[in-house]
Image: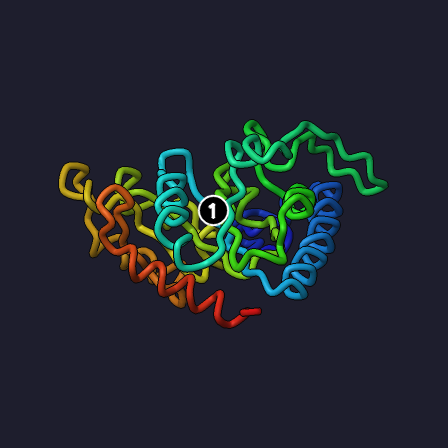
Amino acid sequence: MCEECGCSDAAEQGHDQGHEHDHGVTAALSHNDRLAERNRGFLLAKRVSLVNLVSFSRSKALALVERTLAEYGKRRRVAALTVAGLETMGVHHDHHHGHDHDHGHSHGALPEESPAVDAHAVGHALSHLDLDHLDLVLIENGGSAACQAVYDLGETARVAVFSVREGELKPLKFPLLFADARAVVINEVDQAGTSGFDGAKARANLAQVAPEAAVFELAPATGAGMQGWYSFLDELVMSNSK
């Protein structure tokens, strides 16, 4: 597999037939990785866990975040980084980064129209949170699947989220997004019957691309499965507790 773009090996993809990488993109990813490590060190010092919820437009990850804040927030000190949440905190604003390593993104802390959230945006957002009084930060990271797959944000854990409405083939269609996930959420399982979702096939597909990931079948609308999800978050928080 190519380390720069994640495509299959050279023989399959024709690297010897003119397949070239944009070295500007490679430099941007390198710069992002340095910022991600800075975020990770900062969070470690503050003993705050960061969960990167990578998802798709139809995954209903926001519903998961909202239920988690409402219920798990009674147990732990939790904040969420979403566009709406940042606007409420008054820290969402457009900002173009003019670094020497400028990677061409024009975005706010977590911009609504950005194709992906990067480590710089997350670091900027974290600087506006009172991390001394938090245990956990959730990032609702819905955007370009290709970008999400390679952008390290400095998270403690990456969790891939997809809805039963999106079908059991989702992991096979976007394997890189799932490959590095510590956990996978199959969301809206209360809709599995009406959507024709095959849970057994979905788990088999996940076993191919993310064999080590914990799998949670959740229904934020009804609360089904949420206690198992909260136990997973507890493990993250307790391993990094104040």
Quarter of the image with the C terminus in it: bottom right
Where is residue 19 drawn, in percent x and y?
Answer: 64, 43
Farthest residue in the right direction?
100
What secondary structure is found at the residue carrying circle 1?
A: strand
Q: Relative to the observer, which residue lies in front, 207 or 84?
A: 84
The answer to whether 110 is drawn above or below residue 32 in the figure is: above
> Circle 1: is it few (<14), some (14-19), or many (20+) Cα within 10 Å?
many
Where is residue 125 drawn, in percent x and y?
Answer: 64, 43
Give the residue type at disc 1. Val
The answer to whether 113 is drawn above or below residue 232 in the figure is: above
Is residue 20 something that shows in the picture?
no
Q: Relative to the observer, which residue lies in front, 93 or 166?
A: 93
- In which image quadrant can residue 184 be found? bottom left
Q: Which residue is mark 1?
A: 54
- In which image quadrant can residue 240 be found? bottom right
Where is residue 134 drawn, in percent x and y?
Answer: 55, 56
For the rendered model, the colour scheme is: rainbow
Is residue 133 something that shows in the picture?
yes
Drawn side of residue 1 relative to residue 72, left or right: right
Residue positioned 57% across, 47% down in the render: 14
Quarter of the image with the N terminus in it: bottom right
Residue positioned 26% across, 43% down in the render: 188
Q: Relative to the observer, which residue lies in front, 209 or 214?
A: 214
Residue positioned 61% across, 51% down in the render: 153
Drawn side of residue 152 relative to residue 101, left or right: left
Residue positioned 16% across, 40% down in the render: 196
Drawn side of residue 212 relative to residue 133, left or right: left
